[in-house]
Image (cartoon, rainbow, N blue to C red):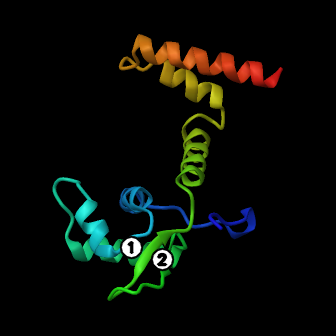
Amino acid sequence: MMGKSRKERLPELSRLEREIMQVVWALGECSSSEVIAAHTREPALAATTIKTVLANLRKKGYVAVVPSTERGYRLRPTVAREQVARRSIRGLVADFFDGSPRHAVAYLLNDPDITAEDLEEIRRMVETRNKERE
């Protein structure tokens, strides 16, 4: 089962841990060598750095060791990407927008990089959400 109960809240992830988790989520069950090969950041991280981050993710409960018939071991994510994203976004809203999703959305809507296509898609999403609530 992916995820933990609210009482067993996992520790926060650092930026580097989130970066490595993105690779683990994309790969699913994987070896540390596969994570190293799939990590594409420039400049590249040292293999030992990635292995250290993976060990920290194991300690924090974000990845688990899976028995392997191959030499070594394999890892799998224990927490869904969506769960971590939801918690991160809630934290961002709490920290920067006084806990107000409305203020966060207003900030994003006023971003100079937002396109007309983005705004139209957001409008459709709001309409759909409003219809679901009726």
Point out the residue furthest to the front here: 69
Which residue in the rendered view is the most extreme toward the left?
Answer: 43
Q: Nearer the viewer, residue 12 or 28?
A: 28
Q: What residue is at 60 percent from the left and 26 percent from the top?
A: 103
Amino acid marked by disc 1: Leu
On screen, residue 65 above or below 18: below
Residue 54, numbered label: 1
Q: Picture coordinates of residue 28 (x, y %)?
A: 44, 63
Does residue 107 appear left or right of residue 101 in this picture? left
Quadrant of the image for the N terminus? bottom right
Q: In front: 74, or 84? A: 74
Density class for disc 2 (Cα within 10 Å; few <14, some 14-19, many ≥20) is: some
**Picture quarter containing residue 18?**
bottom left
Tell me the quadrant of the picture where the C terminus can be found.
top right
Residue at 64%, 25% in the rendered image: 102
Residue at the image position 32 percent from the left and 88 percent from the top: 71
Indicate the position of residue 41 as horizontal and vertical percent values. 23, 54
Three-letter amino acid code of the residue under disc 2: Arg
- Contact check, label 1 and label 2, Cβ < 8 Å: yes
Measured along the vertical axis of the image, is residue 37 above or below residue 128? Answer: below
Q: Mark 2 points at which residue?
A: 58
